[in-house]
Amino acid sequence: MSRKTDLKYLKENAKTHYKVIQIFFDNEKLFDFIAKYREIDIKIKIIPELKPFTKERHISFIPKTFNIDFTEALASEFEKCEVDYATSSFWVKWCTQQSKELKATGTLSLHYYTMRVSNIVKDIISAIY
């Protein structure tokens, strides 16, 4: 329902070894969220979930479905994509950049939401390692 509710839920269910955080596109929001749950003494591992889009139509329904926002930089760059192929290429670059930043700041595990199109994740992983 809200970030505050999410933190409360995490605190109440902190007996698990890890939690996968839903799709997000702004690493700063994730870092802020992690800092807040560390402040309330939650020590479980957080695994961020990244979503490389594979179809232009995903841009309209996924943010509504998962209640997520795009950064201005992401929206501006995405508007330059004209066809699905460019869209996939764009998301490989975006998720690769996002993944590298997460790994550079100490994130040990990443989860990619593929919606049955795993080849795009293979391209991202190849670019990272």
Image (cartoon, rainbow, N blue to C red):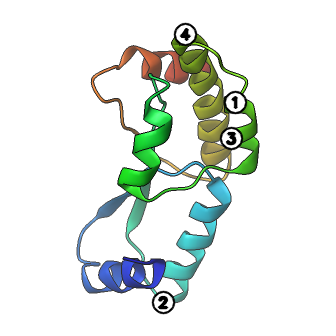
Identify residue type, mark 3: Ala
Residue bearing the label numbered 2? 40
Q: Badge 2 local density, few (<14 within 10 Å), some, or many (20+)?
A: few
As drawn, 76 above or below 24: above
Residue 88: percent from left, percent from top: 53, 18
- Farthest bottom residue in view: 40
Callout 3–callout 2 Cβ contact below 8 Å: no
Residue bearing the label numbered 3? 75
In space, the residues marked 3 and 1 are separated at their CA atoms by 6 Å
Residue 12, disc: none
Compared across the picture, whether 31 is left or right of 4 comes to right
Residue 110 visible here: no
Compared across the picture, whether 128 is left or right of 48 comes to right
Residue at x-position 63% and y-position 53%: 26
In space, the residues marked 4 and 1 are separated at their CA atoms by 14 Å
Residue 79, disc: 1
As drawn, 105 above or below 77: below
Position of the N terminus by quadrant: bottom left
Q: Badge 3 local density, few (<14 within 10 Å), some, or many (20+)?
A: few
2 or 4: mark nearer the eye: 4
In space, the residues marked 1 and 2 are separated at their CA atoms by 39 Å
In the rendered structure, which disc, 4 or 3, sits on the residue that comes first in sequence?
3
Residue at x-position 58% and y-position 33%: 95
Compared across the picture, whether 48 is left or right of 75 comes to left
